[in-house]
Image (cartoon, rainbow, N blue to C red):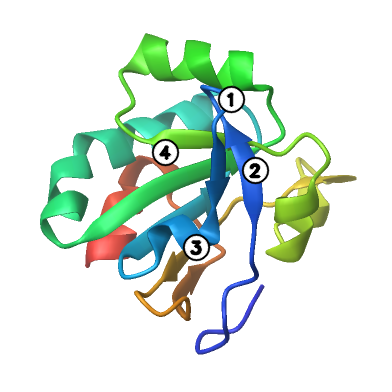
Amino acid sequence: MLTIGTCAPYFEGVDENGSLVRLTDFAGKKLVLYFYPKDSTPGCTAEACDLRDNYQRFIALGYEVLGVSRDSAASHQRFIEKYGLPFHLISDTETTILQAYEAWGVKKMYGKESVGTIRTTYVIDEQGVIIDAIGKVDTKNHAAQLLG
């Protein structure tokens, strides 16, 4: 994982609408940047819905929320529509952003090792510095992990 206190790596990617989203778009705002394995899977859906259900709390505290996975923009659109997600999702099919944020690599699941997305969340402050990093995400209570 990236270290708290370091500058967040620059990124740019395409969201569910095909619009370019860059780290610099969030300058002056706090950003919850979360990485998840796959749209519409049980854990990823629980995590996204928990963030959705607490979205107004994040906004009230000056945070933006942005998700990143390898899924296509079309998959993200369906995921957003199905669950009424109020935030954008970036499609990182080439794993460029995932790798920059150390959210791509070897992971163990059910005793098997595989290479894939490592569920990770970073909170980035108004100046682009990482102020929180969560590697053990509680998908059903992720907002509480972030908001305390």
Disc 1 or 4, which lies upstream in sequence?
A: 1
For marks 1 and 2, the one nearer the N-term is 2
Label 3 to label 4: alpha-carbon separation: 25 Å
Residue 86: x and y in percent read 29, 30
Vertical placement of 125 versus 66: above or below?
below
Residue labelled with disc 4 = 47
Residue drawn at (47%, 81%) of the image: 129
Q: CA separation, marks 3 and 2? A: 12 Å
User: Where does residue 119 sit, x and y in percent of width and height?
Assistant: 61, 50
Tell me the mark number nearer the camera, choosing from 2 and 4. Answer: 2
Q: Quadrant of the N terminus?
A: bottom right
Q: Residues within 10 Å of mark 1 (few under 14, many from 20)?
A: few
- Circle 3 residues within 10 Å: few <14, some 14–19, many ≥20: few
Say which residue appears at 14% left-offset and 43% top-offset.
56
114 relative to 148, above or below? above
Helix, strand or loop at mark 2: strand
Circle 1: residue type: Gly
How far apart marks 2 and 4 lie (CA) works out to: 21 Å
Type of amino acid under label 4: Glu
Q: Nearer the viewer, residue 119 or 109?
A: 119
**How much space separates mark 1 and mark 3, taking CA atoms?**
18 Å
146 left or right, relative to 112 = left
Residue 121 seen in render: no
- x and y, in percent, of residue 19 in the image: 54, 31
Q: Amino acid at mark 2?
A: Gly
Q: Which residue is mark 2?
A: 13
Mark number for residue 18? 1
Circle 4 packing at 10 Å, graded few (<14), some (14-19), many (20+), is many
Between discs 3 and 4, the one toward the N terminus: 3
Q: Which residue is mark 3?
A: 24
Q: What amino acid does circle 3 point to?
A: Thr
